[in-house]
């Protein structure tokens, strides 16, 4: 584990980056320090081509209980300009995580509340314990889930987001699966096994292909028909002649594993 951070732990094993929110005494509530440290570590991950997967989880009983109370005591006295600066830092973190070249897995071991649910929403795959709880609780404080709204909307759609945003209701694990918040919900003692199985699937795929899939998912929905026809055709043409595409197709034809999965 890395000890250079105040609010997170970090380790690398077998091309996998594992990030642990590490404030268990306050249920991993986030503050300005955690936002800065997460931003730093995800920038490092994005620039490290040896890393294939990033897994985010929380130490202790919770994933992330939202904003830290002591931080909120400071925030309540901030000016508009000070609030805007810190909110932009949070927005930049969510965008950095959402656009990370590597696939991301949220290992949700407990409560994911407010901004904690935002950290879940920006991950590609969400695997949750049956004991996990989710809530966009900002309205209970007279606030709104603003910075996380683009990612929640993309993840669950407007119909579900309306209910979650307006009610601030707490959602249990199986309900989260039904609504599309989670991809998989498992018993607490099976959480690591489920995450490891998904990691193996990701490692068996071409790393550049996965990165390009994430780019397609981000860009194509906002394109007009003629634009996405040209763009998608160019993408597959480039991938077919790339080193990774050539290796993958040859491995398939030769009935062997491609080099990246050996």
Image: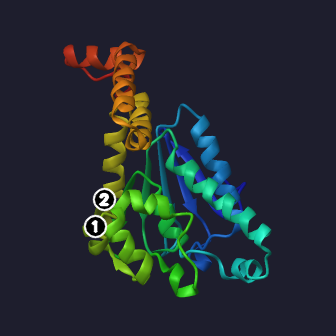
Q: Tell me, for residue 177, which label it has, or none.
A: 1
Task: Verify CB contact (< 8 Å) between mark 1 and mark 2.
Answer: yes
Front one among 235 and 133:
235
Q: Is residue 150 depicted above or below 197 in this figure?
A: below
Front one among 44 and 181:
181
Element type at mark 2: loop
User: In terms of image quadrants, where is residue 123?
Assistant: bottom left
Q: Tell me, for residue 13, which label it has, or none.
A: none
- Image coords of residue 150 (percent x, y): 48, 59
Q: Is residue 35 depicted above or below 18 in this figure?
A: below
Q: Which residue is mark 2?
A: 183
- Image coords of residue 223 (percent x, y): 40, 38
User: In terms of image quadrants, where is residue 24?
Assistant: bottom right
- Image coords of residue 52 (percent x, y): 46, 37
Q: Is residue 71 depicted above or below 210 in this figure?
A: below
- What colouring style does the render use? rainbow
Q: Is residue 26 visible?
A: yes
* Residue at x 58% of width, y 80% of height: 143
Query: Relative to 98, is 80 on the left or the right?
Result: right
Task: Give the crowd class for mark 2: few <14, some 14-19, many >=20 residues within 10 Å.
Answer: some
- 1 or 2: tag closer to the N-terminus: 1
Quadrant of image for the C terminus: top left
- Image coords of residue 119 (percent x, y): 51, 62
* Residue at x 55% of width, y 60% of height: 20
* Residue at x 49% of width, y 80% of height: 137
Task: Give the crowd class for mark 1: few <14, some 14-19, many >=20 residues within 10 Å.
Answer: some
Element type at mark 1: helix
Q: How many marks?
A: 2
* Residue at x 64% of width, y 42% of height: 44
């Amino acid at each position: 584990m890395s000890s250079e951070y105040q609010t997170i732990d970090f380790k690398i094993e077998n091309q996998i980056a594992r990030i642990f929110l590490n404030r268990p005494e306050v249920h991993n509530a986030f503050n300005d320090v955690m936002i800065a440290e997460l931003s730093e570590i995800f920038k490092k991950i994005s620039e490290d081509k040896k890393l294939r997967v990033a897994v985010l989880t929380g130490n202790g009983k919770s994933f992330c209980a939202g904003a830290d109370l002591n931080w909120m005591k400071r925030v309540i006295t901030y000016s508009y300009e000070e609030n805007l600066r810190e909110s932009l830092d949070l927005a930049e973190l969510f965008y950095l995580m959402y656009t990370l070249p590597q696939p991301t897995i949220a290992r949700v071991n407990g409560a994911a509340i407010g901004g904690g649910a935002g950290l879940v929403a920006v991950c590609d795959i969400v695997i949750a314990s049956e004991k996990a709880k989710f809530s966009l609780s900002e309205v209970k404080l007279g606030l709104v889930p603003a910075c996380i709204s683009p990612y929640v909307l993309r993840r669950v759609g407007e119909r579900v987001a309306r209910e979650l945003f307006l009610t601030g209701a707490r959602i249990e694990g199986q309900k989260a699966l039904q609504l599309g918040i989670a991809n998989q919900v498992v018993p607490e003692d099976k959480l690591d096994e489920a995450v490891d199985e998904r990691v193996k699937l990701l490692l068996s795929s071409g790393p550049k292909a996965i990165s390009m899939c994430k780019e397609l998912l981000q860009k194509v929905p906002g394109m007009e028909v003629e634009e996405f026809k040209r763009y998608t055709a160019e993408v597959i043409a480039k991938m077919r002649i790339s080193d990774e595409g050539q290796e993958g197709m040859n491995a398939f034809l030769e009935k062997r594993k491609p080099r990246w999965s050996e």
